[in-house]
Image (spheres, helix red, strand yellow):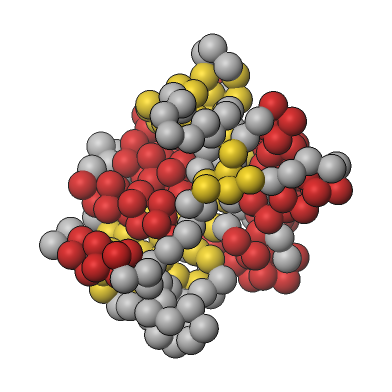
Amino acid sequence: MNINVIKVGGKIVEEPDTLHSLLESFSKIEGAKALVHGGGRSATRIATLLGIESKMVDGRRITDAETLKVVTMVYGGLVNKNIVASLQQMGINALGLTGADMGVIKSEKRPVKDIDYGFVGDVKSVDGERLASLVKDGVTPVMAPLSFSSEYGLLNTNADTIAAETAKSLVPYYDVTLTFCFEKKGVLMNEADDDSVIPVITRELYAKYKADGIITGGMIPKLDNAFDAIDSGVKRVVITRADMLDAGSVIVDS
């Protein structure tokens, strides 16, 4: 049996029209599915309104104690529940989850090395059996990018990582397709040219494009997670625009 794990982020979850369009497309996917969302732009905007500076390194947010409060409110509350409510309106029986809910995503606080990321979690396990059980019962999980540590509680966790780890956890139960949706048609050779999609990305091409500065910023953790998912048995990984779920850049192992 197949399952589609769709990750949506970027401007899509911040703008009502694009979010509604994505959710309409998502609701029409037949069979088992799960949705993972980001919301970083909203978190940055609200943090600014609260006088809290946002700091990023290679597309990842530095999360101090005050920032953790903001991302918890935005990811686990505002964004997650708006998505769940919209899906319910579309007839999808959705359930919003953070890593703390049922302990479904367990992590540990990232150790301080060259950079202190603060209250950021590195995922240790995702309870795929519990998620598969929910899906079997007709529930569509909607996962927020917040993991759970028994020592620290909620921890901010990259949404692409949550998506990849969720997909990997479902491999024993389904043939998994993982799709990363954002505002571009795929991974681009030229960021200014929306039609310069790289149709297939191998490890060798990824290393070359990263070294050449073609692939930068938040696309780096996205592709790292994509290859990690392939290594762990996910059948297919696609990076595309929300209205092009069957197109975009396909990530392959060789």
Residue at point 33% right, 78% down? 198
Q: Residue furthest top?
A: 151
Residue 99 position (above or below residue 191): above
Q: Residue furthest front?
A: 114
Residue 151 percent coordinates (x, y): 54, 12
| Residue 107 visible in this rendered orientation of the protein | no
Q: Nearer the viewer, residue 117 or 104?
A: 117
Residue 139 percent coordinates (x, y): 54, 41
Q: Nearer the viewer, residue 194 or 229?
A: 194
Residue 131 position (above or below residue 228): above
Residue at point 75% right, 65% down? 16
Residue at point 37% right, 72% down? 214
- Give the side of residue 174 with respect to residue 97, left or right: left
- Give the side of residue 174 with respect to residue 130, left or right: left
Quadrant assignment for the C terminus: bottom left
- Give the side of residue 92 with respect to residue 226, left or right: right
| Residue 54 visible in this rendered orientation of the protein | yes
Residue 41 percent coordinates (x, y): 68, 55
- Give the side of residue 204 with respect to residue 250, left or right: left
Residue 45 percent coordinates (x, y): 77, 53
Image quarter of residue 211: bottom left
Residue 66 position (above or below residue 166): above
Q: Nearer the viewer, residue 209 or 200?
A: 209
Image quarter of residue 71: top right
Residue at point 35% right, 49% down? 225
The number of discs equals 0
